[in-house]
Amino acid sequence: MEAPHFEIPCVILCGGKSSRMGEDKALLPFSNYQTLSQFQYERLKPFFKEIYLSSKTDKFNFEKNLILDKENLHSPIVALKNIFETLKNEDKIFIITVDTPFVKIETIEKIINNSQEYSITVAKTERIHNLCGVFHKSCLSFINKMLEEEIHKVGFLLKNSVTKELEFEDEDEFLNMNNKEEYLRAKTIII
């Protein structure tokens, strides 16, 4: 079976503070790669027409497409604004965080294939995975309004947009590495 190829770009969010991890999780070693960000980038790159890392600085030591976020605030809403303004010719963008390395390509394909009529289409297991999904540029005006009002919650954006939550069964697929314990668990899964 031929691997899917998506006609939309993918942006991996790498600009978080990583405060619970105690160090920048995007730069942690993972699998056979020097960093988690390189692992995610190389893993997803073959499936998308373009792939980018969104970050505050160029902290990466591999060849990549980068979207620099110049704002001082660590906010995924600021990152989304910056991404849409940078990729202004794109209608839809697949967004994923650097710290969710187990989301399957089939899952991404299902999210993209079910995103036609929605502003936002995200994955849902026992909880909603706000930053694993397709975002349409029609969200940008509401994102700007949110920032004017200093609202930085992605959940607020989802609630106020035409959002589709797609159900998935496998909670482990969405393992999110927020602390050392989760990182160590993820490393045992990947080997």
Image (tube, helix red, strand yellow):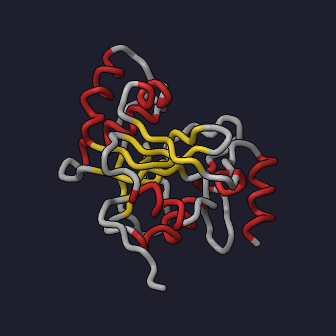
Asked whether, in this view, residue 35 is left or right of residue 116, the answer is: right
Rendered view: 19 above or below 170: above
Asked whether, in this view, residue 163 is left or right of residue 40, the answer is: left
Residue 16, percent across and down? Answer: 54, 40
Asked whether, in this view, residue 39 is left or right of residue 163, the answer is: right
Q: Residue at x 30, y 51 (%)?
A: 92
Residue 70, percent across and down? Answer: 35, 37
Residue 56, percent across and down? Answer: 43, 43
Q: Residue at x 53, y 49 (%)?
A: 97
The quadrant holding residue 8 is: bottom left
Q: How many marks?
A: 0
Asked whether, in this view, residue 98 is left or right of residue 10, the answer is: right
The quadrant holding residue 179 is: top right
Question: Between residues 6 and 180, which one lies in front from this camera angle?
Answer: 6
Residue 189, percent across and down? Answer: 77, 65
Rendered view: 149 above or below 85: above
Residue at far left of view: 89
Q: Residue at x 52, y 39 (%)?
A: 130
Where does the C terminus fall, quadrant-wise? Answer: bottom right
Question: Between residues 1 and 50, which one lies in front from this camera angle?
Answer: 1
Q: Residue at x 77, y 49 (%)?
A: 182
Question: Between residues 118 and 10, which one lies in front from this camera angle?
Answer: 118
Residue at far bottom of view: 1
Question: Between residues 121 and 82, which one lies in front from this camera angle?
Answer: 121
